[in-house]
Amino acid sequence: MSTSVQEQRLRRRFDMWDKNGDGTIDRSDWEGEVKRILLSFGENESSPKGRALTEAYLGMWDHIAVQAEVGRDGALDFERFKAVAAAEVLGRGQDGFDQVLRPTISAIAGLCDTDGDGQVSPQEFQRWIVAIGSNESTADTAFKLIDTDDDGHLSVDELIAAVHRYHSGELEFSLL
């Protein structure tokens, strides 16, 4: 994997969180992202699915903040974020993605899973793409590339693998 691809993708993610453009991200940026995702799904923060996403997403922030030694209420600039993401997620391979990202990906999959089958259908995936602010026209292509077992549904494992493949430069579709 090219470090420049990894850095570009981390920069893109960082900039998406840094809504006020101050060059740092903090817990409030992540809280805002949760609210935006829930709003796009029409989900209430106090519903079970809303609470699950909030807890998972802010748990991801708490983990990163602790590792960066800024505490829950601190802020990270891009260089510190990049270093922690490299050490805690990217550098640990699938284990890092599983530990840090699995709860959030599972919670978003839960929001998408309107039929309760534990997987994400093509129609449900379309909602995911819209919710994260990606181009809706890419949903069909992305779905086919992510559905590695060709069963017509996406499992949480396939979604986590897709995020891993995105950050390693093997996939062009961001899911977070």
Image (tube, grey):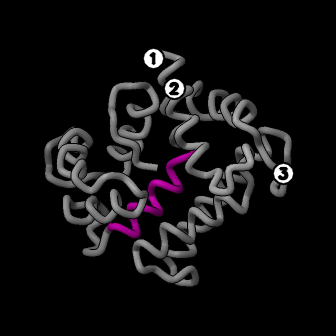
SS at mark 1? loop
Q: Mark 2 = which residue?
A: 6
Image point (26%, 61%), residue name = 126
Q: Position of residue 113 (x, y in %)?
A: 31, 68
Taking depth in this image into account, of 175 and 108 the one nearest to the observer is 175
Taking depth in this image into account, of 82 and 134 the one nearest to the observer is 134
Magenta stretch encompasses residue 107: yes
Q: Position of residue 119 (x, y in %)?
A: 28, 60
**Mark number for residue 1?**
1
SS at mark 3? loop
- Indicate which disc, 2 or 3, sits on the residue closer to the N terminus: 2
Q: Quadrant of the N terminus?
A: top left
Q: Position of residue 174 (x, y in %)?
A: 40, 43
**Can you name the residue that lies furthest to the top here?**
2
Evaluate if marks 2 and 1 touch, with contact meaning CB atoms under 8 Å apart: yes
Q: Mark 3 = which residue?
A: 74
What is the CA distance from the residue labelled 3 to the residue labelled 1? 31 Å
